[in-house]
Amino acid sequence: MSMAIPFVREFVPRYGEAERLTPLIRRVLARNPGPFTFAGTGTFIVGNGASVAVIDPGPDDADHLTALLKAVEGETVTAVLVTHGHADHLPLARPFAQAVGAPVLGHAAVAPDTVLGDGDEVRGDGWTLRAVATPGHATEHLAFALPEENALFSGDHVMGWSTSVVSPPDGDMDAYMDSLERVIAGNYDTLWPTHGGPVTDPLPFLEALKAHRLERDRQVLDQLVHGPASALDMVPALYAGIDRALWPAAAQSLLAHLVRLDRRGDVIAAGEPSAATTYHLRG
């Protein structure tokens, strides 16, 4: 049985204001709470004054744009960074960047002004942001390390309040697990997810996430011992304790595990991968 994940769910939302978190980090929270965004999208401002970077400007929301512009008033924004292209992270990047006269930086898939790859660095006055390729939740997902505070802006790859959705075909469980190992190897002091509060004791949290995914692999195989089944068939047994409204997302996560197990040769699909596709044990 996997260890319990020490989720971080205590979080007091302060919408529309620039909340000072550390000497180098502020956060402005968008008012877009939901089952996949927790209290909302946290846009991070890194640095002070002469050159600041903004990470994940967030959803297409006029009030959030106004709050971000107010937060950096009198400062020079030199970089707008995006972790990935989902609708709660990317849409405001271009309008905000145009308003402050700064370039958008990120993976090629988000159509930035400057493409960032793994290990690329962006520097400002007193800060450095280094791109860390972390595909899995999304193919193009980048996290950003802040060496000056030994911290990582983990986007949606690692969230303190919940496990991340890994939804094929863009989401990939093998890639997710590889990325998790990269974050573990980074030995960061703090993780700053885009949604929710920080993870301040990352190693046991990350090890628990890893154990949880491996346990889910085993649970899927155990389900198939009883006969062929699809991800949709397995959801009631494996996600009995969650809101039924989240079952479709849960089915996608199970599909990601099934695709991973198919690659390993443990299971065989009866057709093209989908939540309704039947799988059976090999041999």
Image (tube, rainbow, N blue to C red):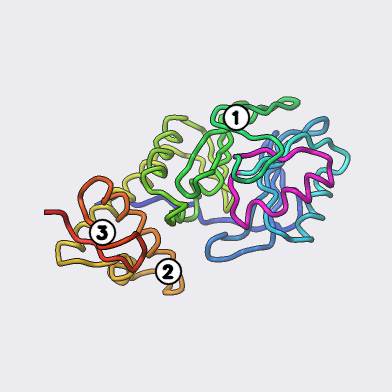
> Residue 282: horizontal and vertical position, in percent?
15, 54
Q: Residue at x 33, y 60 (%)?
A: 272
Residue density around tag 2, few if under 14, some if 14–19, many if 20 or more, within 10 Å:
some
Q: Nearer the viewer, residue 114 or 207?
A: 114
Q: Which circle, 1 or 3, is nearer the viewer?
A: 3
> Residue 67: horizontal and vertical position, in percent?
79, 54
Which corner quadrant holds the C terminus? Answer: bottom left
Relative placement, left or right, of 161 versus 17 is left
Q: Please give the label number shown on residue 47.
A: none
Segment tinted magenta in the rendering: 83-107
Q: Amino acid at mark 1?
A: Arg
Q: Earlier in the sequence, mark 2 or mark 1?
A: 1
Give me the C-alpha separation between circle 2 and circle 3.
Answer: 19 Å
The answer to whether residue 272 is above or below residue 194 is: below
Q: Earlier in the sequence, mark 2 or mark 3?
A: 2
- Identify residue for label 3: 269
Q: Please give the label number shown on residue 248.
A: 2
- Identify residue for label 1: 130
